[in-house]
Image (cartoon, helix red, strand yellow):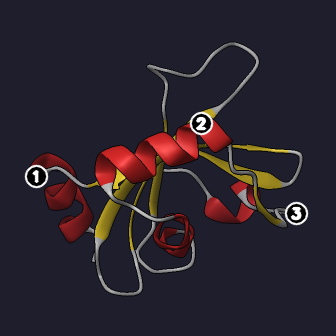
Amino acid sequence: MTIDKRLLFEGVTGFDWDYYNTHKNIFKHDVTISECEQVFFNIPLIINDDLAHGEEDEDRYLALGRTDDNRKLFVVFEVGNNLIRPISFRDMEKPERAIYEKHK
């Protein structure tokens, strides 16, 4: 199910970066913090619930989006305390890219 971004991001004031997850993703996937943040400001931005990995007390989301340089990224994130908390970020895989291209 596609999420209404206006409601999800209502009151959000920035990002919350976890040191371990951030450095793991930078090292493993060569995606910078700046690139990950850009995804949330570019169109199209496709967001769905991550029902497979969320816990009872937290809602996780999956995002497909692009950077300012048109690099297409897949981002797993949470929203809490008015902050977006990226958990994992990497380049889109072929099936994800196909979904993203349909929404352009």
Mark seen at residue 22 = none
Please name the amino acid that badge 1 sits on.
Answer: Lys
Q: On screen, 79 above or below 65?
A: above
Give coordinates of residue 93: x percent, y percent: 17, 50
Please name the amino acid that badge 3 sits on.
Answer: Gly
Direction from residue 49 to residue 98 in the image, left or right: left
Q: CA distance from mark 3 to mark 1?
A: 33 Å
Mark seen at residue 11 = 3
Give coordinates of residue 85: x percent, y percent: 68, 47
Q: Is residue 89 visible?
A: no
Which residue lies at the image location 33% right of the left edge and 86% below the top edge? 69
Are discs 3 and 1 less than 8 Å apart at CB?
Answer: no
As helix, strand or loop, the secondary structure at mark 3 comes to loop
Which image quadrant is residue 65 in?
bottom left
Q: Say which of 102 and 90 sits in front.
A: 90
From the image, which quarter does the N terminus lie in? top left
Are discs 2 and 1 less than 8 Å apart at CB?
Answer: no
Give coordinates of residue 68: x percent, y percent: 41, 86
As helix, strand or loop, the secondary structure at mark 2 comes to helix
Count residues near mark 1 (Cα–Cα under 10 Å), then give few for <14, some for 14-19, many for 20+: few
Q: CA distance from mark 3 to mark 2?
A: 26 Å
Please name the amino acid that badge 2 sits on.
Answer: Tyr
* Mark 2 lies on residue: 20
Give coordinates of residue 104: x percent, y percent: 27, 77
Sequence-wise, the earlier of marks 2 and 1 is 2
* Mark 1 lies on residue: 94
Which image quadrant is residue 19 in?
top right
Direction from residue 97 to residue 45 in the image, left or right: right
Q: Say which of 45 and 103 sits in front.
A: 45
Which residue lies at the image location 48% right of the left edge and 32% below the top edge? 50
